[in-house]
Amino acid sequence: MGKKKINLAILDMYDGEPNQGMRCIKDIVGRFEDQLSCKVFDVRGKAEIPEILEYDIFISTGGPGNPLEGDGNWDLKYYDFLDQIWIWNQNHNHKKYILFICHSFQMACKHFGLGQLTKRKSTSFGVMTVHKTTEGLNDPLFNNLENPFWGVDSRDYQVVQPNPKKFKLLGAKIIALEKIRNHVEYERAIMAIRFSEEMVGTQFHPEADPVSFLSHLKKPAVKEKLIELKGKSKFYEMLENLVDENKIYKTNETLIPNFLDRSIRKIKASKLISLT
């Protein structure tokens, strides 16, 4: 008899649009196909929410649009789902593990009241350095990543002004910040939070791989917009960063696998699922 697989749910926040990010996530999860069984739920398109009793690991994706807005249906169901995960983990030894990415990260920060969710003065898009905080230096999510490491950033919104009381109440920790920008006075945005031992999220896109991002950058409309926004030299510098195996490729190969590997080990250690 083969090993019993652990059930993983991907919460699709892409609003029903085909997205390279989903392909990247599925590709990474596929590296664990001998241990994981995966199902995708269309949260924003069909208001589909996984039943937490049936799944042990969750990945909640990025997505387009305003994280402050919903239709009063899928968004309320999603926030209720977050509460269910939190309450479950407070009351059971067999924990549920979740990774929030970009749009989902922003919504989770808003829901738990950890900071202010604001619209950026301009879109942040490209290959950026992500800087570990003191708390992040030893966080298992970042194992085998340098400080700083590289990530794909794509956001019109940001989480700033952390609420110390909420962080203390939840036991949450800021584990990464955006790069220091000496030429502007804006507060550094939060790039990753450890909500709890089982819940963690990133503002950037750890799933992004060089192939998908390069394909996106080659689209005429994207290329023109970026050159207009950043200039030709910055655009070509971004292309060079993409092919450096110690940058985006390293993050893709490391961060989500760290999350999955640790979650799998913790679930098995709980001895509440059969390993045979």
Image (spheres, rainbow, N blue to C red):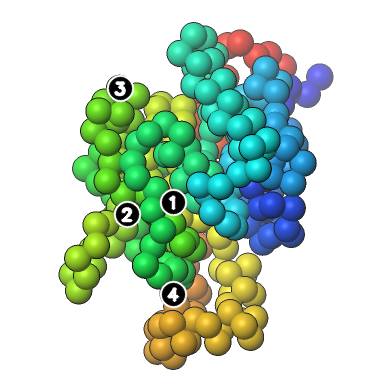
Q: Residue placed at 64% from the left, 47% from the top? A: 13
Asked if disc 2 and disc 1 are in contact, CB closer than 8 Å, the reply is yes
Tell me the residue that label 2 is attached to.
189
Question: Residue 34: where, in percent of width, then height?
Answer: 71, 35
Q: Residue at label 1? A: 203
Nearer the viewer's eye, disc 3 or disc 1? Answer: 3
Foreground label between 2 and 4: 2
At label 3, which amino acid type do we have? Leu
The amino acid beneath tag 2 is Ala
The spot of residue 180 in percent (x, y) is 23, 63
Closer to us: 274 or 191: 191
| CB within 8 Å, label 3 to label 1 | no
Q: Secondary structure at mark 4?
A: helix
Point out the tag, 3 or 4, that comes first from the N-terminus: 3
How far apart are the two marked residues, 3 and 2, measured between alpha carbons? Answer: 21 Å
Q: For mark 3, what is the residue?
A: 169
Q: Quadrant of residue 90?
A: top left
Q: What is the number of the mark on residue 241? A: 4
Residue type for callout 4: Asn
